[in-house]
Image (cartoon, rainbow, N blue to C red):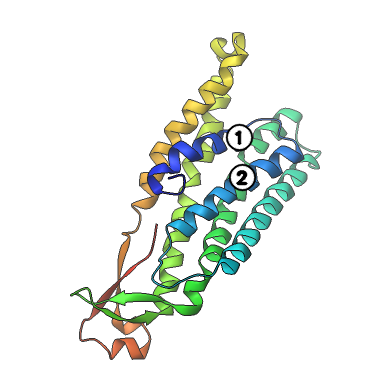
Amino acid sequence: MPFRMSGYIPFGTPIVVGLLLPNQTLASTVFWQWLNQSHNACVNYANRNASKPSPTSKFIQGYLGAVISAVSIAVGLNVLIQRANKFTPATRLLIQRFVPFPAVASANICNVVLMRHTELEEGIDVLDNNGNIVGSSRVAAKHALLETALTRVVLPMPILVLPPIIMSVLEKTSLLRSRPRMVLPVQSLVCLAAFGLALPLAISLFPQMSEIETSRLEPEIATATSSKTVVYNKGL
């Protein structure tokens, strides 16, 4: 259940709240990025095109690569901001709140590619208009991964950009200034609303069963069917 798309919001929101906590230490940055990419890796693997078997060793390789890239990017950006002496402490804190987005977006691309790289090597099944398998295409696999990677860039945009902007405004209100304990619950609700907006938007960018012209595929597939187009399951 935690790795289904329907479970992405309830299981992913606490992680998003953790990623956006202010005054992050190096240890907390590493922990939340690791937890986020671990969850993403399992979601990507569970929602991949599973027409070809994938060995456990490939999953472990992809998982390690995805997590290491995410943590490295996040920590690197944080270190750069901390060393930027021309920023005031308040400006540095505000910029630091936006660090999770470029870190997560770039790491999400690595995550999708590394968790599903066997599809690039072996190809994925393409089907004709009658639902019959025409062949296994690496070109279709590239399109599937590209489309999925783009959704993973769009997905964290509202989640990790809107809450810092909204919270920077809300924290100046008398309500939250007089009740600092309310900041975390309010931030959690803002993150939940942003997640609920972002997930359907990102998934709807491309249909799960995508279409591609046979002339753009491998010659052996183009000659194996009379259909001008074939479909493939890009995964979610």
- Residues under numbered marks 2 and 1 in contact, where contact means CB atoms less than 8 Å apart: yes
Q: Residue at x 45, y 65 (%)?
A: 146
Kind of residue sitting beneath label 1:
Gly
User: Where does the N terminus fall, quadrant-wise?
Assistant: top left
Q: Residue 101 location in percent, x, y?
A: 58, 45
Q: Residue at x 79, y 38 (%)?
A: 86
Against 5, is 210 above or below? below
Q: Nearer the viewer, residue 152 or 131?
A: 131
Which residue in the structure is indicated by mark 2?
35
| First-in-chain label (2 vs 1) | 1
Q: Nearer the viewer, residue 2 or 172?
A: 2
Going by the image, does 25 lie left or right of 187?
right
Kind of residue sitting beneath label 2:
Leu
Q: Quadrant of residue 81?
A: top right
Structural crowding at the residue carrying mark 1, measured as other residues with C-alpha within 10 Å and reported as few (<14), some (14–19) or many (≥20): some
Q: Nearer the viewer, residue 183 or 168?
A: 183
Q: Residue 151 location in percent, x, y?
A: 44, 55
Against 140, is 21 above or below? above
Which residue in the structure is indicated by mark 1?
18
Q: Nearer the viewer, residue 134 or 206?
A: 134
The Cα atoms of the two marked residues, 2 and 1, are separated by 10 Å
Q: Residue 27 location in percent, x, y?
A: 75, 40
Dot 2: what SS?
helix
Q: Nearer the viewer, mark 2 or mark 1?
A: 2
Q: Residue at x 64, y 53 (%)?
A: 70
Structural crowding at the residue carrying mark 2, measured as other residues with C-alpha within 10 Å and reported as few (<14), some (14–19) or many (≥20): some
Dot 1: what SS?
helix
